[in-house]
Amino acid sequence: MAKWVKSLIRISTFEVETLQKTLAEVVTRRTHAEMKIATLDAEFELETVRAKEDYSLQIHMPAYKKGWDARRAQVANDLNLIAHEERGIRDQLTEAFEELKKFEHVSEVTKLNRLRQELARENAAMDEAALRMSYSRA
């Protein structure tokens, strides 16, 4: 295999690995954002139940709801941005895999062509040796 093919495969493999690490980080961030939304929802439900039991809390519930809405909207917006980023990285990763497979295919075809040429040379040498043997016997 030619050195340039090995280099291209190594570079492509590095790019794929880098994108996989980046994707893992983004997925972790997305999971944290989803957990944050779930936590905010649970906290709101808890405060709603507590407000039903305590009138003094019920008075402050509209302000709490307004603040909760703002926090949840911010986290939901962050989640949308993270999901968009994740889609972009997945697309880049798909393209990087395709490039890597192309280089690996070129490497394999080059290797097979070299083997085929070596086999053809061996067969030609064997044919020539067989012809010499048949001429020498005759």
Image (spheres, rainbow, N blue to C red):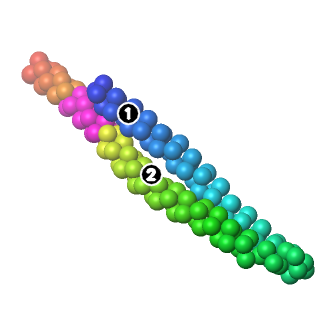
Please provide percent x and percent y for residue 137.
Answer: 13, 20
CA gap, disc 2 and disc 1: 18 Å
Question: Residue 23 placed where, x, y %?
Answer: 52, 49
Element type at mark 2: helix
For mark 1, what is the residue? Answer: 11
Tell me the crowding category of disc 1: few under 14, some 14 to 19, or many 20 or more residues within 10 angstroms, Cα based.
Answer: few
Q: Which residue is mark 2?
A: 89
Q: Is residue 43 left or right of residue 129?
A: right
Specify the amino acid type for callout 2. Ile
Q: Which badge, 2 or 1, is on the more N-terminal residue?
A: 1
- 105 in the magenta segment: no
Q: Quadrant of the C terminus?
A: top left
Q: Quadrant of the N terminus?
A: top left
Q: Pick the residue in front: 134 or 121.
A: 121
Q: Residue at x 63, y 58 (%)?
A: 33
Q: Is residue 136 left or right of residue 81?
A: left
Q: Residue at x 36, y 50 (%)?
A: 95
Q: Does residue 52 appear in this view?
A: yes
Residue extent of the magenta highlight: 106-120
The residue that appears at 30% across and 31% down in the rendered structure is 5
Q: Is residue 9 above or below residue 24?
A: above
Seen from the viewer's position, the closer of residues 99 and 110 is 99
Residue 110 drawn in magenta: yes
Amino acid type indicated by mark 1:
Ile
Q: Is residue 130 visible?
A: no
Q: Residue at x 44, y 42 (%)?
A: 16
Magenta-drawn stretch, dominant element (helix, strand or loop): helix
Q: Which mark is residue 138?
A: none
